[in-house]
Amino acid sequence: MSLPIQHKPENQEFTVSQDGHSAELSYSLPAEGVIDFTHTFVEEGLRGQGIGDELAKAGLAYAREKKLKVRTTCSFMAGYVAQHPDYQDLTEAG
């Protein structure tokens, strides 16, 4: 699935909208060199389409590009990173 994910640094979020529904991945920058993914939300009309995964990929690609270590306060993001070993090097523990 390829949806236009927008990064809104001023709001510290990645968002996507389709057919009047939206989804977001929020983050904070709690320390220099660290990004904490704090919340993922997908409206009911978009659920079951892999949009959460796409938001996760976009957020993690941004972290890799900016050389940021990743915290996953958000349980969805924690599970996503745990299931995808190719992102382990981004975690603070990695």
Image (cartoon, rainbow, N blue to C red):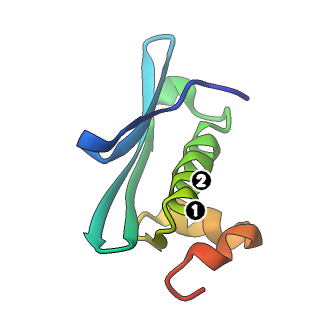
Q: Which of 50 and 67 is in front in this view?
A: 67
Q: Residue at coordinates 65% horizontally, 78% vertically from top-left?
A: 89
Q: Label 1: which residue? A: 64
In the picture shown, does residue 61 fall above or below 85?
above
In the picture shown, does residue 35 fall above or below 21?
below
Q: Label 2: which residue? A: 61
Under mark 1, the amino acid is Arg
Query: CB under 8 Å between callouts 1 and 2?
Result: yes
Q: Which of 21 and 72 is in front in this view?
A: 72
Q: Residue at coordinates 52% horizontally, 51% vertically from top-left?
A: 59
Whole-percent x, y for residue 15 in the image: 43, 34
Whole-percent x, y for residue 27 in the image: 35, 56
Q: In this view, does 19 lie to the left or right of 10?
A: right
Mark 1 to mark 2 CA distance (whole Å): 5 Å
Mark 1: secondary structure: helix
Q: Residue at coordinates 32% horizontally, 43% vertically from top-left?
A: 9
Whole-percent x, y for residue 58 in the image: 57, 46
State the quadrant of the N terminus. top right
Q: How crowded is mark 2: few (under 14 residues within 10 Å), some or many (20 or more)?
A: some
**Residue 48 appears in which quarter of the rendering?**
top right
Under mark 2, the amino acid is Ala
Q: In this view, does 59 lie to the left or right of 25?
A: right
Q: Residue at coordinates 38% horizontally, 73% vertically from top-left?
A: 33
**Residue 10 appears in which quarter of the rendering?**
top left
* Total number of numbered discs in the rendering: 2
Q: How crowded is mark 1: few (under 14 residues within 10 Å), some or many (20 or more)?
A: some
